[in-house]
């Protein structure tokens, strides 16, 4: 990766990945793009352009002008939000992603696609979910993720394009809030712990999902994109996870630092149903073996860092 275009640079991942890539590859070599202006480091710390990913001509012109060799395509609508307007979610998550993929192919650029644990469904083995297994998701978000996993593999096979992807678990971070996801409770809980000392969870007790702290996710994107292609048996997309927990466990981890913290439940049927359709824990052997995936944060280490960062921000 030398000249990188990031789409969705204003989202939860983009606001951290764009500056992270600029530190590694040089600010002038990483172009952040979003549909709206993003005040702060993304638009002020390096090149930034407005881009609607569904506009193929604008996308292609931008890759040509910037002389891009890599597209990190993050623009998308998350799982719970997608259920409110499935066609618009499909338009952005599939039509927009096809446009991005095709523009990258036209300019010979490598392509990163963020898949998700949402690419699995209720018929997938829930525990230690294999890398290669049944994928029959029941959300429009999940259907879009599987579609793009397959299309990225097709572009690799058909056109020899360098497509790579990760199945992200729930990502926990303190810079920007996620919007409209099912795993968002595991971010909101830290914000509310710091601001109110309590949290009402929309995910029910006993519901396990895979999670990861943002610094590990950023490192994973770079490590995968820099991996020796001859070592990659898989392309789109690798299972990755750093931890699997249910709401009581994250609450217990917070209580180690904030003994007075309390949690109750007001379960949201939509997001609970989605969570139940996703795996409890992923098998990440392929990612470890093929490109050395090695997350550093477990639940307690992440909790310590999240709480102290959010207290600093307060
Ligand atoms: C969501 O909850 O929609 C996302 C995801 C797991 O893809 N965080």
Image (tube, rainbow, N blue to C red):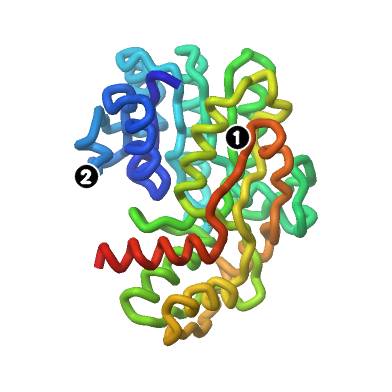
Between 219 and 160, the one lying in front of the other is 219
The reply to whether discs 2 and 1 touch (Cβ–Cβ < 8 Å) is no
Return the residue at label 1: 148
In this rendering, position of residue 84 left or right of residue 312: right
Q: Position of residue 60 (x, y in %)?
A: 39, 18
Estimate how packed mark 1 is, as few (under 14), some (14 to 19) or many (20 or more) residues with alpha carbons within 10 Å.
Answer: many
Q: Would you say residue 229 is visible in this rendering?
A: yes
Q: Which image quadrant for residue 43?
A: top left
Which residue is under mark 2?
40
Q: Quadrant of the N terminus?
A: top left
Dot 2 crowding, Cα within 10 Å, few <14, some 14–19, many 20+: few
Q: Is residue 18 above or below residue 87?
A: above
In three-dimensional space, the C-alpha distance between marks 2 and 1, rounded to whole angstroms, equals 31 Å
17 vs 100: above or below: below
Which secondary structure lies at badge 2?
loop
Q: Which mark is residue 61?
A: none
């Amino acid at each position: 990766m030398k000249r990188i275009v990031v789409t969705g640079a204003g989202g939860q991942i983009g606001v951290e990945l764009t500056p992270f890539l600029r530190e590694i590859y040089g600010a002038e070599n990483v172009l952040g793009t979003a549909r709206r202006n993003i005040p702060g480091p993304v638009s002020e710390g390096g090149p930034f352009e407005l881009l609607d990913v569904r506009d193929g001509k604008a996308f292609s012109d931008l890759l040509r002008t910037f002389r891009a060799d890599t597209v990190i395509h993050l623009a998308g609508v998350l799982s719970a939000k997608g259920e409110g307007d499935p066609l618009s979610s499909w338009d952005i998550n599939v039509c927009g992603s096809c446009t991005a993929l095709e523009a990258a192919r036209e300019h010979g650029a490598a392509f990163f696609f963020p898949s998700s644990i949402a690419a699995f469904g209720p018929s997938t083995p829930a525990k230690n979910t294999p890398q290669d297994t049944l994928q029959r998701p029941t959300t429009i978000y999940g259907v879009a993720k599987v579609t793009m996993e397959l299309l990225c593999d097709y572009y690799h096979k058909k056109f020899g394009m360098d497509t790579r992807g990760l199945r992200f678990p729930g990502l926990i971070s303190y810079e920007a809030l996620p919007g409209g996801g099912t795993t968002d409770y595991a971010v909101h809980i830290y914000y509310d712990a710091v601001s109110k000392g309590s949290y009402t969870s929309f995910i029910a007790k006993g519901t396990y999902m895979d999670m990861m702290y943002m610094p590990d996710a950023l490192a994973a994107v770079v490590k995968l994109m820099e991996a020796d292609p001859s070592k990659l048996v898989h392309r789109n997309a690798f299972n990755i996870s750093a931890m699997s927990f249910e709401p009581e466990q994250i609450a217990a981890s917070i209580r180690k630092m904030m003994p007075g913290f309390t949690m109750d439940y007001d379960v949201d049927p939509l997001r609970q149903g989605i969570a139940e359709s996703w795996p409890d824990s992923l098998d990440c052997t392929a990612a470890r073996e093929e490109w050395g995936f090695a997350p550093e944060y477990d639940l307690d280490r992440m909790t310590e860092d999240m709480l102290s960062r959010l207290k600093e921000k307060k």
